[in-house]
Image (spheres, helix red, strand yellow):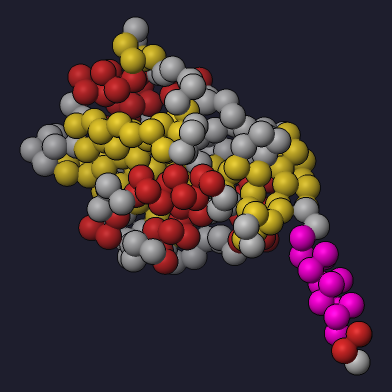
Amino acid sequence: MNRFLTLLRHWLGCALARPRRVESAYSGTLEVTWYEGRKVLNSANANYSYGPLHQVMRYGLLFTEPAAAGNVLVLGLGGGSVVQMLRQEYQVTGAITAVELDPVVIQVAGEEFGIRPDAQLRIVCADAFTWVATAPAQAFGLIVVDLFVDLDLPAGLYTPGFWQHLWRLLRPDGYVLVNILISTEVWVENQEVSSYLAEVGFLVKEMEVEEYNRLLILRKPAKAE
């Protein structure tokens, strides 16, 4: 019996550790695997959710007062680790809207990580850069921007219209948390992105986290319109 239980545990461990791979028209091969005892979602070259990126975003959220945010917008769902953190670690009780371009990613988030629409969570399959143009003004107290395709930043991050829409969607005294890469320069209208955002009206805080990530913490002043 003891030998049988040992073999059963070994078989279950191997089964749980075996990666699941799915093909995406946007992200190529996505892999659900295990990292430091936790299930994670990776693309070919990047962690999409629950691995090192989870720690980066957790740190960034410390500076955004999530519990006081009310409604939250998440641009880039991934496996849903930001949604999970907002609910479980930061006690966000307002409505969360998550916008994700890739239907395969949405499917994996539901099947592998239990991130599905409910009374508090709305998941929208859409291009974030198109969607923000249609959303109502001052609808969110916190916006989280984590828009990657593998290790590439989408072209929309380099356009002034996107950032101006975020300003419009954010209520006064609200925050935006933006995840980009240290190694990739983002220029908007011939200005480095942080300088451009300060001209838009945001209060800008920058930080480098781990070896690769650069976080922008943006705050809309309380008296801003």
Residue lying at the far top in this picture: please name it: 190
Screen quadrant of the N terminus: bottom right
* Residue in the picture at 52% in, 26% down: 153
Q: Is residue 206 left or right of residue 54?
A: left
Figure check: 171 above or below 120: above
Q: Name which residue lies at 39% across and 58% down.
A: 86
Residue 116, how many percent across, how many down? Answer: 56, 61
In the drawing, does residue 202 fall left or right of residue 151? Answer: left
Q: In this view, does 121 lie to the left or right of 11?
A: left
Q: Where is residue 64 in the image (x, y as percent from the top left)?
A: 27, 48
- Residue 149 image offset from top left, x and y in percent: 60, 31
| Magenta span dominant secondary structure | helix
Q: Which residues, given as a range, are shown in magenta? A: 5-17
Nearer to me, 118 or 36: 36
Viewer-proximal residue, 95 or 19? 19
Q: In which quarter of the image is residue 220?
A: top left
Viewer-proximal residue, 135 or 206? 206
Seen at 54% across and 42% down, the residue is 100
Q: Does the magenta segment cover residue 14?
A: yes
Q: Tell me which residue sits at (72%, 46%) in the image.
A: 31
Is 28 colored magenta in this rendering? no
Which of the 4 image quarters holds residue 187? top left
